[in-house]
Amino acid sequence: MAVGSPVTPVDVSRHDPATIRAAQIVLPCADLDPTVDFFVDRLGFRLDAIFPADDPSVAVLSGHGATVRLDTSVDGAAGRLRLLCDEPARVESPPVVAPNGTVIDFVPAEPPVAVPPVDQELVVNRLHDEARWVVGRAGMRYRDLIPGRLGGSFIASHIHIPHAGPVPDYVHFHHVRFQMIFCVKGWVRLVYEDQGEPFVLEAGDCVLQPPRIRHRVLECSADLEVVEIGSPAEHETIVEHTIELPTEQLHHDREFTGQRFTRHRASLAAWQPWHRNGFVHRDLGIGEATVGLAGARVVRPTGEPSPERLAHGTEFQFLFVLRGTVTLDVGDENPVHLGHGDAVSIPGAVRWALRDCSPDLELLDVTLPANVAPQ
């Protein structure tokens, strides 16, 4: 059958997936022998089958986790094959073309995280005026707090799970530069690689998820709400098929791509003066765990805030109102009135101040880098 030719629909629901033994990638091949030699000699595949013996027209090869079927009776595009490599020199080599026309790309097995240049802008996202929820991975409801993604460099999501009970998640990890989870409402039970038994993250608690740490969401309370912040905005979520959680070893100081897992518990936190007069904060431990890459804190007023507008010169400044109300004064712009569930991203060069704080105000403040000096 030619590739791309019409296919009669089949009700696959009647077929048991357990009866499927393996999968093959079918590639058209006009000239079989040189193509087989190319896959074996140049790419390191193994010839598993070839037939018919008197005039071969099909060859099956395996290697690098894939099985390829070269078939001279198949028409259509020759396709493209990606080989994941550990050797830098091989990765830097240009694509090669097999005798059958298949293009072979050599790509890094574990590519570095690509973060687009940050395109800063003032972004105000209000819960009641602009809330748009979509169903994402594992049935969770997502609200995008920075729709423009600051040029693709950052993502901030308000995540809601309405019903209590088990979460249909699986062991996975993320290919990221930075990622943290803050519990806004309710509780969620999580488990992380090398960090011991599952634990409960309650409202006000936070975790830093270092790059590539295996983890899983197990269950949650009704109306769970968390805020998840990451960089870059688009990143891979990779399913883990081998490692089971919890892992037998306990290794709290293990580094994952230069960062360490950290869990902040609000009930144990100490408050200290913030860098803006009239406020205190509790540090969430993100700065230490990321070696200064990022920082996060919960801020609340203690008196009359200073009206002086200051800038921070940061790559990323993000505020989320956990409770209460506040007015963001950004100079020439109209005052921005914020309440529970509202979020704002502030460019590093913008001078701003907080005023008209309600007594119960609490803000989640996240920055890159961790240490910022008002100017």
Image (cartoon, rainbow, N blue to C red):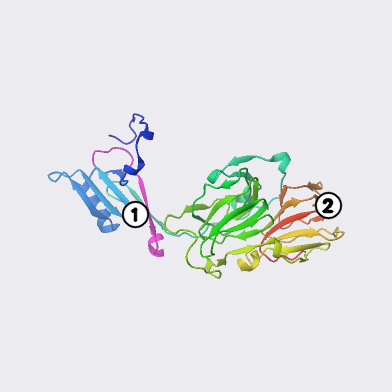
Which residue matches tag 1?
65
Task: Point out the stretch of residues depicted in magenta.
Answer: 72-97
Distance from Cα at disc 1 to Cα at disc 2 = 59 Å
Image position of 128 (left or right of 359)? left
Q: Decide which of 117, 369 is in the foreground and name it.
A: 369
Residue 1 in picture, x, y percent from top left: 27, 34
Whether residue 122 is situated above or below residue 372 in the rendered picture:
above
Q: Quadrant of the C terminus?
A: bottom right
Q: Is residue 150 visible?
A: yes
Q: How many marks?
A: 2
Image position of 363 (left or right of 137)? right
Residue type marked 1: Gly
Residue 155 in picture, x, y percent from top left: 61, 51
Say the numbered circle drawn on residue 358.
Answer: 2
User: Mark 1, residues whose alpha carbon is within 10 Å: few (<14), some, or many (≥20)?
Assistant: few
**Which mark is first along the chain, 2 or 1?**
1
